Amino acid sequence: MKRIALLPEGSVSHEAVVHLFGNEPVEFVHYKLISDVFLSTVQGKSDYSVIPIENTIEGSVSLHMDWLVNEVDIPMQLEWVYPSIQNLIGNQKEFLSDKDEVDLGKITKILSHPVATSQCQQFIRKYAPQAILENVGSTSEAVEIVKSHSGQGWAAIGTLLGATTHGLDVIAPRVTDHDNNFTRFVLIGADSVELQRPSSQMKTSITVTLPEDYPGALHQVLSAFSWRRLNLSRIESRPTKKRLGSYYFYIDILEDMNAVLLQASIAEIEALGCQVRILGVYPIYTYDK
């Protein structure tokens, strides 16, 4: 049975991977910190790690991208998208009015992961502007902390699975500011993964580091894909962390590495003096309700 490292039980990562694997036999290994999730697979304590890398509202999760590129050398094996449905969670009895209706004005503090909190700013400003906001390591940790501080008027922003896991109530459902709030996850590990469900497409992820003394190199790199009509779904610049002003480019190409046109593109880019690193060639799985 494959062991999969991920953030705490009840987190969005947990919900997402349960949805992806369904009834397939896997064992989940939960960690509080994303660094420990990465290191679990590096150190052989798990076969794979679940990494959220992009969100509809917040964009790229830069910390996680930097870990993928700079801290570990583990290939991406598949990608899937899952809706980040956040809820306001707590002990409902603490927030009931004299008419037995939920009064969000009684909330003194709201805890969550900073990404989840930022996804719910409009709701918080409208219904609980008096609440102190506190960042913690994950939405699941927030729910767990709220449970251990009963009677203080604390609430958490988290998942339905998180509320169920820790035996708390959903005070207000679906509190995210946008209905199209999705998170892109990747599974990293040494071996490829085959799922029973069909994938929608193949993707190749690479990094390109430009030569220092080649004016117009980025234009040449993009042209190598463009004239071959290869579809780039993402391009992002990130610092190399070697010196100020030095960047690499992270690029997603909607094509299998075995495709002749993609191989020719990479050969052309390397001929320019660019350094190309392949981060993964993997299937994409779309969200199905």
Image (cartoon, rainbow, N blue to C red):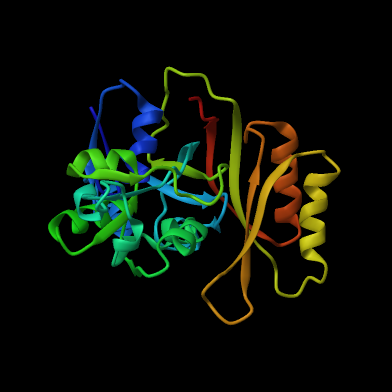
Query: What residue is drawn where x is 50% and y is 62%?
Result: 62
Quarter where residue 228 is shown: top right
In this view of the protein, which residue sits in the foreground, 61 or 39? 61
Residue at the front extreme, as displayed: 99
In this view of the protein, which residue sits in the foreground, 153 or 183? 153
Q: Indicate whether 215 appears above or below 100.
A: below
Judge from the rendering whether residue 68 lies leftward or rightward of residue 27; answer left or right. right
Judge from the rendering whether residue 40 lies leftward or rightward of residue 74; answer left or right. left
In this view of the protein, which residue sits in the foreground, 131 or 184? 131
Judge from the rendering whether residue 99 lies leftward or rightward of residue 202; answer left or right. left
Image quadrant where one finds the N terminus: top left
Image coordinates of residue 89 in percent, x first then y, are 29, 49
In this view of the protein, which residue sits in the foreground, 179 or 18? 179
Image coordinates of residue 159 in percent, x first then y, are 34, 44
The number of discs equals 0
Query: What residue is drawn where x is 42% and y is 53%?
Result: 73
Q: Indicate whether 141 appears above or below 243.
A: above
Query: What residue is drawn where x is 61% and y is 28%?
Result: 201
Residue at the right extreme, as displayed: 227
Question: Can residue 49 be seen in this snapshot?
Answer: no
Quarter where residue 4 is shown: top left
Residue at the bottom extreme, as displayed: 244
Image coordinates of residue 115 in percent, x first then y, are 44, 59
Q: Indicate whether 70 appears above or below 231.
A: below
Question: Can residue 125 be seen in this snapshot?
Answer: yes
Query: What residue is drawn where x is 66% and y is 34%?
Result: 255
Image coordinates of residue 30 in percent, x first then y, are 23, 46
